[in-house]
Structures are given as structure tokens and as C-alpha cells.
Image (cartoon, rainbow, N blue to C red):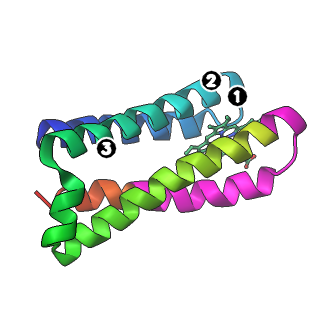
Amino acid sequence: MTPVQIYSSAVFALVLVGVSFRRRPKIHIPIMLSAFALDLGSVVFLQIQRRAVQKAASKPTPILLVHISFALASLILYAAMTATGTRLARTGLGRGTHRVLAAIFLVCRAGTWVTSFFVV
Ligand code: HEM
């Protein structure tokens, strides 16, 4: 595993820990926001280090396109989870939406992780 893959695996493990604390918002919320920040950090790092976007734009392999699609969807869904989670914490509304988006997010984040092993 490359250092970035180890980092990404650790963040994914943190996401799973955060989901296991889904009934305890005081623990769940800081863990999920930390995972969001850490995943954003790796995108910024890859962009600076490897110019990932330019690489994807010039000669993308099919698996790289799948990987980037999962990664982009995960980042958008992090924002959606933050919005629906904040609403749920403040008003108690939108639990169903937060839960459905969580399932889609987990598929996308798992997809990002699995495909990361095939794009190196
Ligand atoms: C990708 C990130 C996240 C995932 C995958 C996730 C997932 C979940 C899941 C599966 C639940 C249980 C829903 C149910 O009742 O069936 C939950 C509950 C909750 N989440 Fe999230 N969440 C995420 C991020 C956030 C964030 C960023 C916030 C707040 C800013 C948040 C706030 C909450 C709250 C308040 C609850 C209800 C806790 C309770 O039962 O009292 N979540 N989350």
C-alpha cells in the first residue's frame, strides 16, 4: 500500500467508527466532520503532489474515471451529510433523508477506496 492508500484506509475506518456511533451525536458529529476534513486534505495533497485533475483530463483510464466519479460523489455527499445532519441535530427533521444519503455515501466511499488500489 502507498502512504496515500494507508491514509485513505484509515479515514474510511474512521467513517465506519463514526457510523457505529450514529445514535450518539456528540461523538458521531465530530468524527464525521473530521473524516470530511481529512478526505478533503488528501484531495488537496494529491492535486498539489500529482496534479491529479490534469492527469485525469489528459489520458484517463476507465478505472481512473470510475475512481474519480466515486471520489467526487463522496465529496458532494459529505456536504449533503453535513447539511442534513445539521438540520437533524437542530430540528430532529430529515432523519430518513440523512439515512438514505448515508447508504449512498458509504457505497461511494467504499468504491473510492476499492478502486484506489487499481489506479496506481
Ligand atoms: C458522511 C458522513 C455521515 C454519515 C455516513 C452519517 C450517517 C448517519 C446514520 C446512518 C445515522 C442514523 C440515522 C438513523 O436514525 O437511522 C446518523 C444519525 C445522525 N447524524 Fe449522521 N452521518 C454523517 C455525517 C453527519 C454530520 C456531518 C452530522 C452533523 C453535522 C450528522 C448528524 C447526525 C445526527 C444529529 C444524527 C441523529 C443522531 C440521533 O439519533 O440522535 N451526521 N448519521
Q: What residue did someone put label 3 on?
A: 43
Q: How many marks?
A: 3
Residue 10 picture quarter: top left
- Please tell me which of labels 3 and 2 falls first in the chain: 2
Q: Nearer the viewer, residue 40 or 70?
A: 40
Decide: is 57 above or below 45.
below
Decide: is 62 above or below 118.
below
Q: What residue did someone put label 2 on?
A: 27
Check the image and name the residue furthest to the bottom: 62
The kind of secondary structure element at disc 2 is helix
Q: Is residue 90 left or right of residue 119?
A: right
Residue depicted at 58% across the width and 59% down the height: 103
The x, y position of residue 88, in whole percent, is 80, 41
The x, y position of residue 53, in whole percent, is 24, 57
Residue depicted at 79% across the width and 50% down the height: 95
Task: Specify the segment rendered in magenta.
Answer: 88-109
Residue depicted at 33% across the width and 57% down the height: 112
The x, y position of residue 98, in whole percent, is 71, 52
Identify which amino acid the numbered label 2 is placed on: Ile
Decide: is 80 above or below 49.
below
The kind of secondary structure element at disc 3 is helix
Give the distance between the C-alpha atoms of the residues marked 2 and 1, in whole angstroms: 6 Å
Q: Are marks 3 and 2 in contact (CB under 8 Å)?
A: no
Is label 3 or label 2 in front?
3
Q: Nearer the viewer, residue 3 or 16?
A: 3
Say which mark, if any, is on residue 24. Answer: 1
- Please tell me which of labels 1 and 3 falls first in the chain: 1
Question: Can you tell me whether the CB of the residue at mark 1 lies under 8 Å from the nearest atom of ligand 1?
Answer: yes
